[in-house]
Amino acid sequence: MASDTLLIFVLMMSSVRLGKSAEALFNLKCQSAVGVIGQTTNISCSIESQTGSIDINTVVLTRFRENKPCFTFQPYENRVTGDSRFKVESLPSLQLHNTSISDEGGYKYYIRTNLGHVNAEFRINVTAVYSPPIITSEPTEIKDGGAADLYCRASGGYPAGTIHWFDQRNTNWTQNAALQITQGHDGLFTLSSKLSFRSIDSTWGPFRCVVLNYRYEEEEESTTHLRREANSDSVSSTQVVMGTVGGIVFLIALVLFVLLLKRRCLEQNSPRNPDGVEEETALYKVVHKKAADEDQNTAV
């Protein structure tokens, strides 16, 4: 710790003497970087020189509003102190591995060379992509002309973004929605949007919930198809019709059953001719007719 403090003190003292001449010879430029949480952030820097080659012997990285360097590197000794997640990609550019929310902010970059020293500043912005949004509704089944609420929730993003609502015709309904933003212990944000209708029409669906990041760029979206509630009047009419048809079928079956039962009863109660009666009757008629014919001939 004492050696690091002494190093910074020596560098600062030497910069007083060589600063003006060094700035006239070369210039350091760094571009601000955008890192994704958990990934590697590349910090691109370059040296513009009016002379030949420049030998870098020390780099010091310090955060704004802090005095103690967060990272130092001495190439000739291959000595690194401070945050080990910082790496030298190719001098003077840097890398930051496993980027976190706490890394967001401004930095002062100091480089000492064989020609003197030079300073530059840059900023690291940190982002995290939101999860695909989940849409729910209350009630679950929508009744045309009734009140309804649509909910959309997306989490795990950074920085805070927003949610927009669109129907099937791409009409923006966001002005009818209320957005709630909460930040967790991990620093990540959760977006919750509620779209309310006093009188909804199921033909407006499907609805899209679109998640926009802090730059107002679309990140994720989900679509919901409204589940329409069955019409109670039509259900009642159907039930009445079905009940009527069922009653008619039952009555027809009952009448047929009664007729069948009556027929069986009549068949069982009607008298039956004994064996040979029909044959005897026919024979009697023939004999009687023959006798009548003979009597008629005799009378003649």
Image (tube, helix red, strand yellow):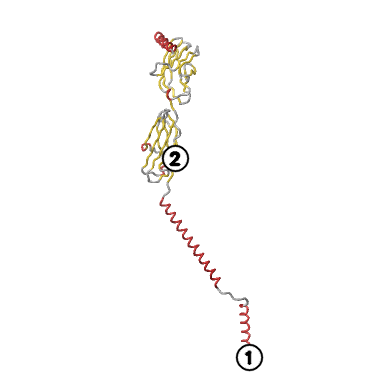
Which mark, residue 27?
Answer: none
Q: Residue furthest top?
A: 17
Q: Residue furthest bottom?
A: 299
- Measuring from the top left, give residue 250's x and y in whole percent: 48, 61
Tell me the quarter of the picture where residue 50 sits. Answer: top left
**Tag 1's secondary structure?**
helix
- The image shows residue 238, relative to residue 200, as above or below, that is below
Name the residue type under label 1.
Answer: Thr
Task: From the viewer's side, name the closer residue of 235 and 199.
Answer: 235
Tell me the quarter of the picture where residue 278 sits. Answer: bottom right
- Measuring from the top left, give residue 188's x and y in whole percent: 42, 29
The structure residue drawn at horizontal position 44% and vertical position 40%, both measured from the top left corner, is 224
**Tag 2's secondary structure?**
strand
- The image shows residue 238, relative to residue 260, as above or below, that is above
- Measuring from the top left, give residue 93's x and y in whole percent: 47, 18
The span from disc 1 to disc 2 (Cα, nearest Å) is: 114 Å
Q: Quadrant of the C terminus?
A: bottom right
Residue 298 visible here: yes
- Measuring from the top left, give residue 263's x and y in whole percent: 53, 69
Tell me the quarter of the picture where residue 112 sits. Answer: top left
Residue at mark 1: 298
Residue at mark 2: 224
Name the residue type under label 2.
Answer: Thr
Q: Residues within 10 Å of mark 2 (few under 14, many from 20)?
A: some
